[in-house]
Amino acid sequence: MVRKTGTVAVKRQGSNSTSQPVPKKRKVQQPPQPTKAVDDVESLKRELKQLEDQRRKMGEYLAKEERRLRRETIRHERDADHHEEELQITIRDVEAAIREMRKENQKMKLEEKEQEGLMEIIKKGREMDIADEETAFQNEETISEVYIRRINDLKQKMENTDVTEVDPIVAKNVCEKCYMEYKDVATDEKSPKVLPCGHTACLACIKELTVDGYIRCPFDRTFMKLDETSLPTNFAAL
């Protein structure tokens, strides 16, 4: 029975095919694939990714450079402060050196002035030596004549006067430079003053021999610095 059924079914199909034509199936056209647009999108995505990578790297580079510049700025500021301190120290040292040079210059000027005064004293001393050599004998003769006159006066007084009634005779001291009698007044020109070398002369002679604060002793020719106002009085010579 199965076979009969199958045969009938075939025939029926065959009878239908002859009676009604079967329409042809139409081919469905598939829409074109957007291959070019996809490629462009993919290309743009790749470019965008590359740009993002570059931007990220650039940001990292800029951050790194910023940190480096900050470190450099701090280092330069420290160096500038250090150089400023060194410059200030150098300026102070130069100013101190200038002050020392000025002091040395003033000291040299004073020494030069003192040297000129000393040379003037030496010159005057030489002139005085020449004059002293010429007048030495005259001074000695004058002193001798003074003592001889005093001795003769004493002898004359002794001859004319009773020895028992003679008043005590007091010898008078004189300046050995000008042979003038000393006076017992500290501020007087004939007051006996003691020189630093130990010799005594009247104040008038000392002032005459003093040049720019220096004097040459008229007795031993010693050069010395002198302050006329601070000389002590030799009361023993009065």
Image (cartoon, rainbow, N blue to C red):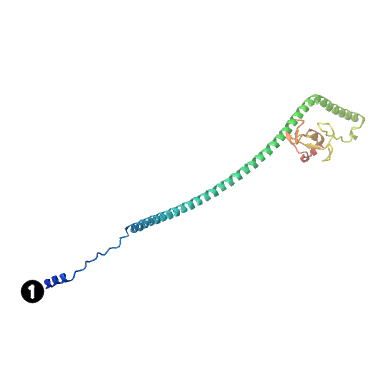
Residue denoted by label 1:
4
Say which of 27 and 159 sits in front: 27
Q: Is residue 87 left or right of residue 202?
A: left
| Residue at (45% x, 53% y) in the render | 62
Residue 7 coordinates in the image, percent (x, y): 9, 72
* Amino acid found under the numbered disc labelled 1: Lys
Q: Is residue 173 left or right of residue 3?
A: right
Q: Is residue 24 left or right of residue 142?
A: left
Q: Is residue 145 visible?
A: yes
Assign the C terminus to one quadrant of the image. Answer: top right
Say which of 176 and 222 sits in front: 222
Q: Is residue 221 visible?
A: no
- Residue 202, by quadrant, is top right
Look at the picture and state if 39 lies above or below 146. below
| Residue at (75% x, 27% y) in the render | 126
Circle 1 sits in a helix, a strand or a loop, which is it?
helix
Q: Residues within 10 Å of mark 1 (few under 14, many from 20)?
A: few
Look at the picture and state if 114 lies above or below 31. above
Look at the picture and state if 163 lies above or below 42. above
Task: Identify the residue at the far right of this view.
Answer: 160
Assign the N terminus to one quadrant of the image. Answer: bottom left
- Residue 142, by quadrant, is top right
- Residue 191, by quadrant, is top right
Residue 105 coordinates in the image, percent (x, y): 67, 38
Residue 231 coordinates in the image, percent (x, y): 77, 39
Say which of 187 and 12 sits in front: 12
Residue 232 coordinates in the image, percent (x, y): 77, 40
